[in-house]
Image (cartoon, rainbow, N blue to C red):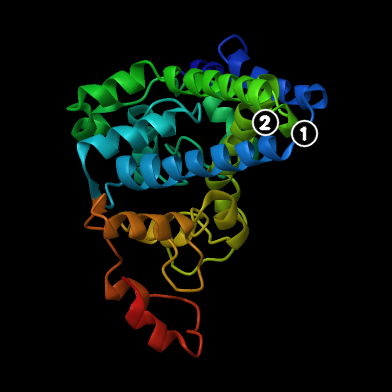
Amino acid sequence: MENQQSHNEKINWRDSIGFFAIHLACVLVIWAGISWVAVLALVLTYGIRMFAITAGYHRYFSHRSYKTSRFFQFVMGFIGSSAAQKGPLWWAAHHRHHHRHSDQEEDIHSPRKGLWWSHVGWILCDKYKCAHLKLVHDLQKFPELRFLDRFHLIAPLSLGLILFGLGATLNAYFPQLGTSGFQLLIWGFFLSTVLLYHGTFTVNSLAHVIGRRRFETSDDSKNSFLISMITLGEGWHNNHHRFPSSERQGFYWWEIDISHYILRILSWFRVVWDLRTPPKKVYAESRFLKRPSQAVKDKTIR
C-alpha cells in the first residue's frame, strides 16, 4: 500500500507536459520583445485572473463566503478557469479537503511533506488528478459549472486566441504601438499564467512557513504582507484558517486585502451580497497587541 501511494505521488511527466511547456514558453519573450501594450496585457491578465481565483475559486466556490447571481457565478468560474488551474469544482473540492485536514497526514499539500510538494508537487502527480466531488455537492447542481470543470481548457485556450488576435489587429491598424499577436500571447498568457501559478501556489506553501501567527489554530498557517500583495489579499492566511467562511481575510484596516475591496465595491451594485465577516469573539482572540487607533478603526470593519 505504501509503495502504491509513493508511486501515485511521483510526477507524472507525460500528463505534466502542458504545465512545463507553459513555463518553457516564457523564454520566447526574448524574441517577442517588449512594449507598453504587452506590459499592460500582463498586468491586466494577471490581476483579473488572480481576482477570479481569490474571490471566485477560493472565497466563493470553496467557502461560499458571499452570495451572487448564477450569471456572475459562471463569469467568475470561466475567468478563473482561464488561469489554467483546472475547473471550479476540482479546485474547490481539493481546497475544502485541505481545510478539513490542514497540515495533518491527510492534507493534500502541507509543507510538512516538503516545500516542493506543497508548492507544486501535489499538482503534478496522479494521486490528486481527480477530486472528491462529494465535497462540492452544492456546486454540482449547476450544469454550467460541471461543464467548466469537464472542459476546463476551453477558457485558457480562448484567452490565448483572443490575445493573439488582439495583438495582430493592433499591429495591423496601429503599428506605432510596436506590438503583435505573438508578443501579446507571450506576455498576456504565458508569462502571466506562470506568475499566476506561483503566486497562487505560495499560499499553499510559503503561507504555512513564513510570516506571523495571530491566532492559535491547529495548523501552521501564517500571515504575510508580501504574499497578500502578490495574491490580492490571500496572504492573511492565519486569519483565514481561524475563520474560513469570512469573505474578508485582512481582518484589520492595515491588512491590505484588494479582493475584499473589489467585492465591497461590487456589493454596492448588488453584483454580490451578504459578505460574511468574522464575529467579535474572533477579534478578541488576537495574539497581537492592538495598535493605538485600532479601537476606533474596529468600528468601521464590515
Residue at horizontal 71 percent and vertical 40 percent from the top: 36
Residue at far front of view: 173
Q: Residue at x 50, y 90 (%)?
A: 292
- Please, is residue 129 above or below residue 39 in the view? above
**251 and 211: which is toward the camera:** 251
Gap between marks 1 and 2, in whole Å?
A: 8 Å
248 or 76, nearer to the observer: 76
Q: Residues within 10 Å of mark 2 (few under 14, many from 20)?
A: many
Vertical position of residue 223 compared to residue 191: above or below = below
Q: Amino acid at mark 2?
A: Trp
Q: Tally the marks.
A: 2
Res 257 visible: yes
The label on residue 187 is 2
Q: Viewer-proximal residue, 248 or 113?
A: 248
> In the rendering, at what x and y percent does residue 96 appear?
34, 40
Q: Is residue 185 left or right of residue 245?
A: right
Kindly report which numbered mark, 1 or 2, lies closer to the viewer in this rendering. Answer: 1
Residue 20 seen anywhere in this rendered image of the structure: no
Q: Residue furthest left?
A: 141
Mark 2, secondary structure of its residue: helix
At a point 72% along the width and 33% down the height, the residue shown is 177
Marks 2 and 1: in contact by CB < 8 Å?
A: yes
Q: Circle 1 is placed at which residue position?
A: 34
Residue 281 circle label: none
The image quadrant where one finds the C terminus is bottom left
Callout 1, which amino acid?
Ile
Q: Residue 76 appears at what percent x and percent y? A: 36, 37
